[in-house]
Each structure stands twice: as structure tokens, then as C-alpha cells.
Amino acid sequence: MEKVIGDIVEWLQNQVKDAGVDGLLVGVSGGIDSAVVANLIKRACPDNSLGVIMPLNSDPEGMKHAEKVIDTCGIKGITVDLANTHEEMFSTIKEQLKDEYNEENGKLADANLRARLRMSTLYTVATNYNYLVVGTDNAAEWYTGYFTKYGDGGVDILPIVDFTKGEVRELAKYLGVPDEVISKKPSADLWEGQTDEAEMGTTYDKIDAYLKGESIPEADKVVIERMHNRSAHKRNALPQFKKKG
């Protein structure tokens, strides 16, 4: 495990060098993935790493977990509360749409706006420090597209994208991530009571098994493949029109 972590840390240091920046930054949500990345960037850039907590009408327990992650890994941390910014922006959009506002689509649009406000915040802070924005997507999230395009998917580098959720859990244990963070139900904190697995309709264990070529129930396989196919645009390069002749 120390060898794996050492390889990631070296890769992160090379990314900093190649990009000509001064350090690394990650949004810390209180979840396991961002906790692992916070620990990794602290190891890679001990004096030039930053964890940003961005509450947005968030679960108070999740914010306590985020603060504990910052404290336990020793990374520098700041908090930017986005609740008022989000409320003003989303209410203004709804007001302009008036009768054409779609309540059903609006819930997803609202959730994605939250993720994109966090992304904008991270890049604003990163520019201030001349840091790279480090992503937290793991292999399960990347394969299924369980991330917001230009939200939590809007980052510069992805250090744990080749690791299953189970492997991330093992990294977390080795790195000393607090037990309550490791054992909690994964949530993107997009609305009250939201959990990843309830929204996806399958579990991370099933996705991990699928990615490793193991047998899983047909119903879960259908869900995973449908998510993968529908989210291809998130992983692929943007379509570009080419002039003829």
C-alpha cells in the first residue's frame, strides 16, 4: 500500500512540475474520496496544498466530517459558504423562466448548479494560489458517469480514477482517514437525504465487481451499462465540427 501511495504522490508532484504551478487544491466534502485526495496532496505538496470546504445548505454532520479530515491530515483549509450565492442565482433563473419552469427537471438542474458553483469556487481559489484543481472521481463514478459535467467532473487531474470504491476505502484506512468518514453512506450532498447508491439504483460493491469482471445480478448489470452508455459524453472529447475541403 505504501508503494501505491508513493506512486500516486510522485505522479502528483510530476503534474505540478509539468504544469508549472505551485501546488494542489481539492474540495473537501466530508466523504471518503475527497478525504483520500486531501491526504495525498498533503503528502505531495506539504506546504502548498489546500482543502476547500464549500457548504451549501449541507448536512451539518458532513461539514463536521470535512473539518475533521482537514484537521487529521494537517492540510491547510478554508471554508466558502455558497448558500446565499446559490439561492440568488437559482431563484433568479426560475423567475426568468416563469411558467416554463419544469419542476421535474428543475431538481436535477438545481443539483448540477450546486456542483458547478463548487467547481467555479475551486478554480477561483486555485487561480489565486496558482494551484491545480484535483478531482476525486473513482473508477466506479467515472465508468458510470456519476459526476456532474463541469461540476465535480470539472478538474485538472484525476489521481484516484483508476481505483475502485473498495480500493479507495483501503487507501483511506491506510492514510488514517477518520472511521466515521470511511463507514458513512456515500453522498454528493446535492439535496437533503441524498445518497449515491439510492440515486444510482445499484451499489458501489456491485459496480466494483462488474469492473473487475465478476458476476453480478442481471438487474444491476443493466443499470450499470445504461449509466455508462448514457454518460459517454462526459468522458469523451467534445464533438467538433470540421470544415469540409
Image (tube, rainbow, N blue to C red):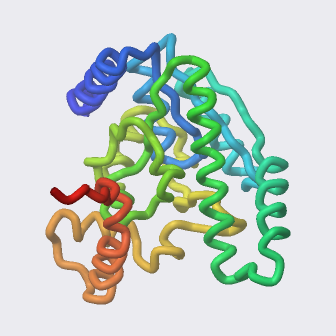
Q: Is residue 133 left or right of residue 97?
A: left
Determine the residue positioned at 27% across, 21% down. Answer: 10
In the image, residue 11 sits, relative to residue 92, either above or below, namely above
- Farthest residue to the bottom: give it: 219
- Looking at the picture, tell me which residue is in the foreground, 120 or 146: 120
- Looking at the picture, tell me which residue is in the foreground, 13 or 125: 125
Residue 108 screen position, x and y as percent: 62, 71
Residue 134 screen position, x and y as percent: 44, 35
Quadrant (top left/top right/bottom left/bottom right) for the C terminus: bottom left
- Looking at the picture, tell me which residue is in the foreground, 210 or 72: 210
Determine the residue positioned at 49% across, 22% down. Answer: 131
Quadrant (top left/top right/bottom left/bottom right) for the N terminus: top left
- Farthest residue to the front: give it: 245
Q: Is residue 173 left or right of residue 8?
A: right
In the image, residue 95 sits, relative to residue 151, either above or below, namely below
Q: Is residue 152 left or right of residue 79?
A: left
Determine the residue positioned at 60% across, 51% down. Answer: 116
Q: Is residue 15 left or right of residue 80?
A: left
User: From where the camera sits, is residue 28 visible?
Assistant: yes
Determine the residue positioned at 30% across, 59% down. Answer: 241
Residue 172 screen position, x and y as percent: 41, 41
In the image, residue 94 sits, relative to residue 167, either above or below, namely below
User: From where the camera sits, is residue 166 visible?
Assistant: no
